[in-house]
Image (cartoon, helix red, strand yellow):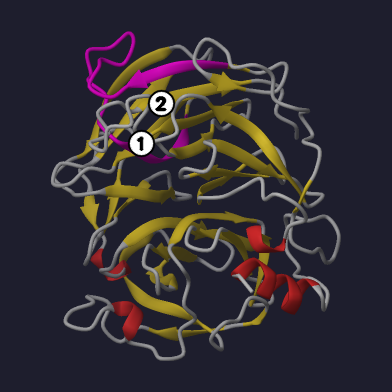
Amino acid sequence: MDRRQVLRAGVVGAGAAAFSGALWQEAFAAVAQPGQSPYGGLVAADGNGVQLPAGFTSRVIARSGQSVPGTAYGWHWAPDGGACFADGAGWIYVSNSEIPVVGGASAIRFGPDGSIHSAYRILSGTSVNCAGGATPWHTWLSCEEIALGRVMETDPWGVQPARERTRMGRFKHEAAACDPDRRVVYLTEDEGDGCFYRFVPDVWGDLNTGRLQVLCAPSGTTSGPVTWQDVPDRDGFPVPTRKQVSAALRFDGGEGCWYDRGTCYFTTKGDNRVWAYDAVDSTVGLAYDDSLVSGTPPLTGVDNITGAPRGADLYVAEDGGNMEINVITAEGVIAPFLRLTGQGASEITGPAFNPVGNRLYFSSQRGVSGAKSGSGGITYEVTGPFRG
């Protein structure tokens, strides 16, 4: 039996693991299943090669190695994780660069009507900046996806210098999500035997000092209670952080991370799962698993994740697959929201909504060229009647 058959026999046959959380409106829900998108099916690709539901439009806002329209700033290669920040009546979209040595991050500043006002660098001198997360105090945590990688706290406006936050652990960082209710920051690790962490700062809003903890549960747990233990040496040398606590629960390639009203959702690419950590009851469960769906899984290559600010839906990007962003609805339905055509050698990165919630930003890291350098990266904006 393959993995899908084993899991279906052992989990679905006994009733899919249920969990509580803010995403689903019912008290308990099983893993998301394929169904009809609330936006309807995808129509033919537009002039940008993007398939969208009726009523939505796309535009290209930046291309790697070319000046951002209306500015003299050259957009970085291999665009990856991103987030939006309110800027008066406008907003700023920040984006990492997942290339070695000179990775860093850039930003594009928009006016209230969506016009581009400026573009600029906010982080330099770092390496393989993959994902990250926004903070409630309006900074961007840019994470290095390298051995002994760091978290860099950056200023989306590009005024304050970036600051190293090594107390948050030195490991192969992927994404971060702030939980203002418990005053912690959740962190994913992109390793086949990686861990799920949280940083507990001594003072909320100051990430200079605090404790790094790792989520613990019996090996193989996919549903049930969990605990947290301190990581003895957050510097991760000579013993990596993920190997310091024997009770730590292992995850197969941690990727995106998103916190919403008591639940932290995070993804693992190695097994195509979206996890839900219920921070109120300290339990973990599965929001999506390609092995537990009926029929053909709509979402594979599970990667970056974000939530709609005006609703409870999640949007999950694919690294590979058929180059889609899928929506997981509050009713537990998963369906394609958009698809890129002619870019099978790329991956979708950096999904993020503007503060009002009517524009979605994301990138194709390698674009139509598929160049591993990321020189063909394309960053998009989708506008339309997002629900909520």
For label 2, the SS is strand
**Residue drawn at (22%, 13%), measured in percent from left and top?**
72
Q: Are marks 1 and 2 in contact (CB under 8 Å)?
A: yes
Residue at the image position 58 percent from the left and 30 percent from the top: 339
Q: In the displayed structure, would residue 271 be above or below residue 69?
A: below
Q: Residue at x 45, y 84 (%)?
A: 248
Relative horizontal placement of residue 320, taking residue 272 as reference (left or right): left
Under circle 1, the secondary element is strand
**Residues at marks 1 and 2, CA–CA distance in whole angstroms:** 9 Å
Figure disc tally? 2
In-front residue for pair 187/379: 379
Q: Determine the residue positioned at 69% across, 19% down.
A: 43
Residue 60 among magenta residues: yes
* Residue at image mark 1: 95
Residue type at mark 2 is Thr
- Mark toward the start of the polypeptide (1 vs 2): 1
Quadrant hosting residue 78: top left
Q: Position of residue 130 (x, y in %)?
A: 33, 48
Q: Which residue is mark 2?
A: 379
Out of 35 and 291, give the one closest to the viewer. Answer: 291
Q: Which residues are magenta?
A: 58-86
Q: Position of residue 220 (x, y in %)?
A: 57, 82
